[in-house]
Amino acid sequence: MPSGKDTSSPPSSSLTANAFWSAFGSLLYSIGRILIVIILTKRFSSDTVGELLFALAVVTPISFLVNMEVRSVYVTDTKNLFRPGMCLTTRLVSNGGFILLLLVICGIGWGNWGWHKAVLILLAGLVRSAESIGDVYLGVLQKAEQMKCWAISQTAKTSLVLISVVVMAFVTDEIIWLLLAWLAATVVVVWLYDCRMAGRLARMALCWNRTVGEQLIKRALPLGFFVAMTSFNANVAPYFIEHHLGDKMVAYFGAMMMFVNGVAGIQNGVNHATLPRLARYHGERSRAFWGVLGKTLGISWLGMLAILAVVWWQGEMILRVVFNREYSQQSPLFPLIILSGGVILTGMILGDAIVACQRYKSRMVAVAMGLVTNIVVCGLLIDAHGLKAAVWAILTAAIVTTLMCAIVLINVAGQRKKQ
């Protein structure tokens, strides 16, 4: 039984407009994250930057797992089974569990990490918690296809966080204060904009219904597990690098990967815009489904080819100017990292198409196979071959995941033809 009718307003923007606003907001958000890393590399030592990047690598996969993928379930819920308030209640409770879990992890790892790295992990976890609560509000905007408001939110967060980080970076030598400023800026935008805009489209009052809530968790938990595996897949290399090579190498690797993460953030924004439409087209208009998917892939490939050409030509200079000469010593690996990014983006697009088809388990299997590949290659080769092996691992894992997603979609197409 539905828990109540979703009061979200009907779509009022075209797919092209929504994709533009989503890409625009994601572009600014990604640029902001890259600028933060740039500021850190110029203001702090590579060891300190590596500590922060390692903290984010620890926190992010756990956050996705514990908080589950509530937003994707809500956005693709064409029958309006789940109220936004129930999604928010679920997210608040899961965030409490997330912070408790981080406290346990930091307590266990205190001896190896030291107090400074443990505090960074806890603060990074609080930042992720604030972002994940805002994610529910943004899901309401996404389902209503109000991506212009979504873009305004991303722009406001990026601007305020960046300003706060810049100020704190030049006021203090302690990166802990920088994370506190990051947290405060995120909370301000979530409270003053995200919450209010979502409230205009849907009732956000906290609520719970055991039967429907169990259905929500049943759908969101596997997706959360899958997103956590995806995030863990992206962060496997830093774990091994930190263990075998130290924090400084984590900083070098993370700096180059920030370009891939930035482009992936833009792609994720475009995918957010297309996901509700793909979900509807899957059930109504098969040809339109494949048309949207093909256009998304084509634009992504053209963009990554252009980036790869620039990096192949001037990769060393880019790293030297953007970061410093210390980071530019790793430039021979830069083109291969960008190539890996192109494969990762393809897998993201195909993976979201699988979600639109509600083939959640299939996507989990694809990501799991990529994750296992990544762990095996990192475990066997990083100690002996350094950062080069980490890049090999990322590329190999991305290829495995993308191929599996493609096989699933081919199977979906075959089944539709038989119907």
Image: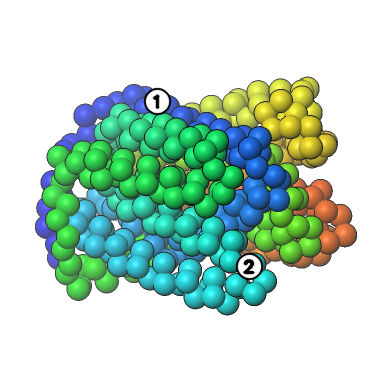
Q: Is residue 227 left or right of residue 203?
A: right
Can residue 19 be seen in the rendering of this structure? Answer: no
The circle on residue 365 is: none
The quadrant of the picture occupied by the N terminus is bottom left
Q: Quadrant of residue 51?
A: bottom right
Q: Amino acid at mark 2?
A: Gly
Q: Is residue 226 above or below residue 10?
A: below
Residue 416 vs residue 165, the one in the foreground: 165
- What is the secondary structure assignment of the residue under circle 1? helix
Name the one closer to the observer, 120 or 140.
Answer: 120
Q: Please state the horizontal and vertical placement of residue 130, each as a whole percent of the image.
A: 36, 52
Q: Judge whether 5 appears above or below 117 on screen.
A: above
**Coordinates of residue 41 in the picture (x, y in percent):** 66, 39
For mark 1, what is the residue?
20
Separation of marks 2 and 1 at Cα, in angstroms: 45 Å
Residue at 67% across, 28% down: 322
Name which residue type carries label 1: Phe
Dot 2 corresponds to which residue?
114
User: In the drawing, does residue 31 fall left or right of residue 80?
Assistant: right
Residue 98 x, y percent position in the rendering: 41, 67
The image shows residue 177 at horizontal and vertical percentages of: 49, 49
Q: Residue at x 48, y 68 (%)?
A: 102
Quick one: SS at disc 2? loop
User: Which tag, 2 or 1, sits closer to the chain's start?
Assistant: 1
The residue that appears at 25% across and 38% down in the rendered structure is: 193
Q: Is residue 330 above or below residue 93?
A: above
Residue drawn at point x = 77 percent, y = 24 percent: 317
Q: Quadrant of residue 54?
A: bottom right
Classify mark 1: residues with Cα within 10 Å, few (<14), some (14-19) or many (20+): some
Of tags 2 and 1, the one toward the viewer is: 2
